[in-house]
Amino acid sequence: EKNESKNFIEQIIDKDLDEGVYEKVHTRFPPEPNGFLHIGHAKSILLNNGLAEKYNGKFNLRFDDTNPMKENPEFVQSIKEDVQWLGATFEERVFFASNYFETMYECAIKLIKKGKAYVDELNSDEIRTYRGTLTEPGKNSPYRERPVEENLELFEKMKEGQFGDGKMVLRAKIDMSSPNINLRDPIIYRISHTPHYNTGDNWCIYPLYDFAHPIGDAIEGVTHSICTLEFEDHRPLYDWVIKELEYEKPPKQIEFAKLYLTDVITGKRNLKKLVEDGIVDGWDDPRLVTLSALRRRGVTPEAIKKFMELVGVSKSKSSVDYAMLEYCIREDLKLTKPRIMGVLDPLKVVIINYPEGEVEYLEADNNQENEAMGKRQIPFGRELYIDREDFMENPPKKYFRLFPGNEVRLKNAYFVKCEEVIKDENGEVIELRCTYDPETKSGSGFTGRKVKGTIHWVEAHSAVKAEVRLYEHILKEGEPLIKDNGEWNVNPNSLKVLDECYMEPIVKEANIGDSFQFFRHGYFCVDSKDTTDKKLVFNRIVSLKSSYKP
Ligand code: ATP
Ligand code: MG
Ligand code: MG
């Protein structure tokens, strides 16, 4: 394989393997269990797991749970489900940074003994001031030159809970004048008396990310520790920790650009706020791009994989058009899902020359582009529903659907002609009376005359009633999610509920999570949360129209 076809991370790995830096590839995905995963995380999961698969290596799922304030087991559970759903193969390789607290503590002791860490009593404001700025070097803390013994004693007391939150910290002793602010004696341990969801109150000191992460990688034998660009400036600190702790097989940090999608909300902070304020129906509200929301909406892991392949991996920041994700979703569903008829806004049609009480079954392809999906029988009778938008009393030119005196094809059935329009007392059309021509049956080879329009329909008595939910982006185009006055600014059309829709009887057999294409309306999935024995709810996954050209 040529290098050109490989992304920059694969090129680094190839070189490492060639030069014998590592014998095998070992990656990890390190989420903090402080929220649900979103589409951005999927990029990291698929990248890390994909590399492990490609190089016949290993992939770990590691919970980066070193902050007792924000983490909980419910998030751990949802993350496991999401990673599994995406098809990443971690099996028994699930790890928790919090299970390494003892080792991390010993690592801290080791640094103190080497004279590479000290207990600082400056408060957080002072530490910030002393740290300096990009243009100004930092200043040493007055506690920086404490003797090793005193540091060991104080750190022990920190661990034993003798000090309150924020009273003291452990800092790495590196270089207060480094041009890289991350190296100006970063904090590596802090005090927090909040109980931890995993370790309870065993600990009241917690390692910070920059200290905990390289240790976790080293413990697990990770070779390539892949993270996003904002950690590029932290890499020297990552390497410093690994070097000072004298790990023999140092892991290597590699950064790539985060995935940003247009028009959607990623970032746990906003997602969490939307959920907590009840603006959305939980973390899995189909308007969100959490993985659980995408799953509930009917997006498949295959579509997400296809999308990530198309996006690629790079070091330059960019935002990807949401329409590209939709394109991948359609591409994945188009050959695999049955194409059936569903009426979202019903208008009754009576075929006046069709015998009352009679039903016949017409044959239809399940998917015209995939013969292997077979055929099904659709009931046809005297009373039908069509979509209201497929009829106009006074149509403009070039309207080829139904109007008084016009003939159209009912898909998979017959030609019908509109003979009479019935209205209620308000003048609203409530029923159409049509005639059909038995000779025009679909598949009969009839060539006597042609019609320009084909519309979909369902037989009224056998049709299954359902609720359909249509979605738009939760963000208003070009506007912020939260207004200047702090109020939510959510697109009011982001959810549209249609509560009287009729589907072909085949949907009676559908299970939660099953998807269909409804002719002309798009792809729909049976909702997992609100569907009951009595009520069938469909989420629109994506419409058929596309603005994206591959
Ligand atoms: P958020 O900013 O959405 O809260 P996070 O980075 O704080 O995300 P973590 O749980 O720390 O969430 O992320 C776990 C891993 O996923 C990290 O390695 C992180 O770099 C990666 N990741 C997070 N967001 C994205 C994204 N948009 N694109 C690619 N990778 C991402
Ligand atoms: Mg975070
Ligand atoms: Mg993070």
Image (cartoon, helix red, strand yellow):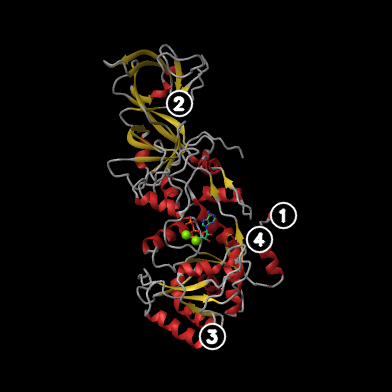
Element under label 2? loop
Residue marked by disc 2? 411
Going from N to C along the chain, the mark reached first, 4 or 2, is 4
Crowdedness near tag 3: few (<14), some (14–19) or many (≥20) residues, C-alpha within 10 Å: some
Residue 86 at what x, y percent from top left? 49, 55
Q: Amino acid at mark 3?
A: Lys
Towards the viewer: 36 or 61: 36
On the picture, is 477 further left or further right than 237?
left
Residue 216 appears in view: no
Q: Residue 197: x and y, percent?
A: 36, 68
For label 4, the residue is: 10
Res 527 visible: yes
Quarter of the image for the C terminus: give it.
Answer: top right
Q: Which residue is mark 3?
A: 113
Earlier in the chain: of badge 4 and badge 3, it is 4
Marks 2,1: beta carbons within 8 A: no
168 shown above or below 319: below
Q: CA distance from mark 4 to mark 3?
A: 39 Å
Q: Regarding mark 4 in the picture, which secondary structure is present there?
A: helix
Q: Which label's residue is closer to the chain start, 3 or 2?
A: 3
Of the 4 image quadrants, the one containing the N terminus is bottom right
Please, what secondary structure does the residue beneath circle 3 have?
helix
Label for residue 4? 1
Residue toward you, 479 or 545: 479
Q: Nearer the viewer, mark 4 or mark 2?
A: 4
Estimate the spatial distance between the alpha carbons at disc 2 and disc 1, rounded to whole Å. 49 Å
